[in-house]
Amino acid sequence: MKKFVTISSILALTSSAHAATTVDYWLWDSSQLPAYQQCARDFQKLNPDISIKITQKGWDDYWTGITTGFVAGTAPDVFTNHLSKYPEFALNGQIVDIAPYIKKDGVKDIYLEGLYTLWGRDGKQYGLPKDWDTVAIIYNKDMLKKAGIDPKALSNLKWNPKDGGTFEKLVAQLTLDQNGNNGLSKGFDKSKVKQYGLINPWDPNPYGQTGWSWLAVSNGFKFNDGLYATKYYYDDPKLAETIQWLTDLALKKGYLLPYKDTKGLGANANFVAGKGAMTTDGSWMIKWYIENAKFDVGFALLPVGPSGKRVSMFNGLADSIWSGSKKKDEVWKWVKYLGSEACESAVGKFGVVFPATKKGVSNALAAHKKNGADVSAFTKLTQTKGSTFLFPITDNASQINSIMTTALENVYLGKANAAEALKEANEKVNKLFK
């Protein structure tokens, strides 16, 4: 659910001048466009009577186009869907229950454990899994070397919300003022920082996927009691002290690029611009960092929290069918192919995301290895029981997003105390379910 993509492009892939049906397919991540162009070419060889037209839009334009398209009758036949969006689309009858198609064609659950279930509710199915992701630290190798820090030390970091643990000490050590003093020095001037130890994505939203969820959950916080739960725990003191620690790290200590300075470009753009030594991000961004940073980047495990574990949100995407499509049989063929081992394996070879099947993942790991990138920081957590937690799938997602965004932005900007703001926000969120 990142917003870094700003390029919008349209690509029509026509396999045959005689193709009878054109299927419109949208996605938001420009990095994944070549992989799905390959899937479209492969699909069209098998189905010469169907042409796939792929449109890629940046995050904000993408969802605006989807939602306005539902009303105007111009939505794409198929689109990449997100767990934060699909329950509302399903409730409003805007996407198709594909369970009958799956049953008719005998489509098997070939995906990594749990991914298929995320896209179903009450016996209905709203997508076939296409990939998954976790979060890790991305660091600037040159900045660590200049600070005399062995990158291996990043794998042994511990964090707590009281004094920040060894994680905060590292962030402070990597923060430099204009006189060359680091954050551990008595002479450090937080008003003249030239290099931040950490550029956090902040994530002022209900999920905090790359910004705060991995800290809060490692501190004992949980969002709710599971899929479609109707009670949230945003008023948990463990979340409040986590959010307050992050905010103070920026506003009081000067080790973290403030929220107001990341809001425009985003954390990833500031990081590749050399403004900080570390950031945190999802596995779908691995290739982007390698290709866009003008320095060598490395990937490291998240720190261990007070719970004794390092944890990451485990998220996944799927492709859904617009209920207004007039060519559902052809559209279903494309969706079925997108979720097939053939397409997932092809996507894996591009080394952009981790596909939803084992073979696809193996291909992705091989691609990263070929490029010299050690991405085990993203995969190790999935191999350790209790080290991942699911994206909170919920009803009322739009309203929750509005409430939590306002609350977190006020805290991040120093306008509100985290404990008070989150308690008030949680009351508003839980009222949505009464």
Image: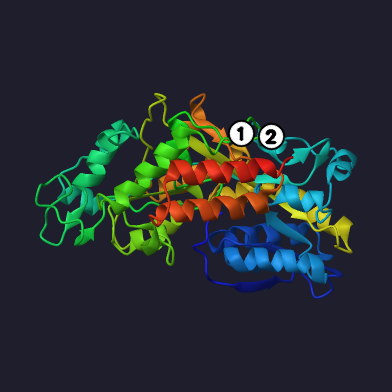
For label 1, the SS is: loop
Q: Is residue 210 above or below residue 5?
A: above
Q: Residue 29 carries which label?
A: none
Q: Which x, y percent locates residue 68?
A: 74, 68
Position of 321 compared to 6: left or right? right
Position of 398 compared to 307: left or right? right
N-terminal of the pair, mark 1 or mark 2, is 1
Q: Mark 1 packing: few (<14 Cα in 10 Å), some, or many (20+)?
A: some
Q: Identify the residue shown where x is 37% and y is 37%.
A: 301
Amino acid at dot 1: Asn
For label 2, the SS is: loop
The residue tagged 1 is 224
Of all residues, the one furthest to the bottom in this rendering is 17
Location of the C terminus by quadrant is top right
- CB of mark 1 within 8 Å of CB of mark 2? yes
Q: Is residue 119 above or below residue 291?
A: above
Q: Is residue 165 above or below residue 324?
A: above
Amino acid at dot 2: Ala
Location of the N terminus by quadrant is bottom right
Q: Which x, y percent locates residue 355?
A: 59, 45
Nearer to us in this view, 162 or 3: 162
Kindly tell me whether residue 157 is visible in this rendering.
Answer: yes
Nearer to us in this view, 4 or 393: 393
Kindly tell me whether residue 292 is visible in this rendering.
Answer: no
Q: Identify the residue shown where x is 63% and y is 49%.
A: 400
Q: Which x, y percent locates residue 428?
A: 62, 46
Report which quarter residue 244 is drawn in.
top left
Q: Which x, y percent locates residue 273?
A: 32, 64
The residue tagged 2 is 229
The figure's colour scheme reads rainbow
Nearer to us in this view, 375 or 5: 5
Position of 49 compared to 261: left or right? right
